Amino acid sequence: MSELPEDFLDQIKAIYPSRSGGQGWPNTRKAIMRHVKNGTSFEDIIAGTKKYAAWCDATGKTGTELVKMAQTFFGPGEWWGEDYDLPVSSCRYDGLRKWAES
């Protein structure tokens, strides 16, 4: 197994976007350990988590039920490996900008 910092779950919790509802942290811990055991670097997992958190912030999902449960995000679907390209604009901010310019 590759090295995982002792506080790896605390590091994930600190950057993972908040959500309405549970996260399933015990299953998250097991899933991350399994991914690292199978060759994924913890640094890649952290990078993917940061991308997802930035995407959730940019799209207004942070703090809502639309944020994936952590146990799903780190599960077999490997959602942490997605690109999560930030939107060029979003209706939420575009509408406010257009209102402010009028």
Image (tube, rainbow, N blue to C red):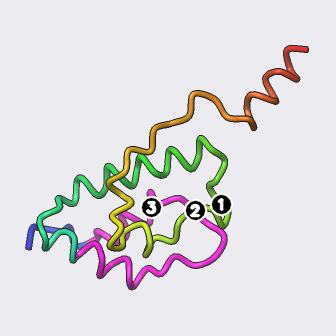
Of the 4 image quadrants, the one containing the N terminus is bottom left
| Residue occupied by mark 3 | 14
Whole-number angstrom distance, CA of label 3 to CA of label 2: 15 Å
Say left or right for 70 vs 66.
left
SS type, badge 3: helix
Say left or right for 59 vs 70.
right
Is residue 1 shown above or below 96? below
Is residue 60 shown above or below 65? above
Mark before the other along the chain sequence, 1 or 3: 3
Q: Quadrant of residue 46?
A: bottom left
The residue at 51%/71% (across/down) is 69
Q: Which residues are magenta?
A: 7-33
Q: Amino acid at mark 1?
A: Gly
Which mark is in front, 1 or 2? Answer: 2
Q: Amino acid at mark 3?
A: Ala
The residue at 44%/57% (across/down) is 15
**Do the residues bearing badges 1 and 3 touch, measured as CB atoms within 8 Å?**
no
Mark before the other along the chain sequence, 3 or 2: 3
Whole-number angstrom distance, CA of label 1 to CA of label 3: 14 Å
Is residue 18 shown above or below 51? below
Closest to the observer, 15 or 84: 84
The residue at 63%/62% (across/down) is 66
**Do the residues bearing badges 1 and 2 touch, measured as CB atoms within 8 Å?**
yes
SS type, badge 1: loop
> Which numbered marker is on residue 63?
1
Q: Residue furthest bottom?
A: 26
| Residue occupied by mark 2 | 67
The residue at 33%/78% (across/down) is 29
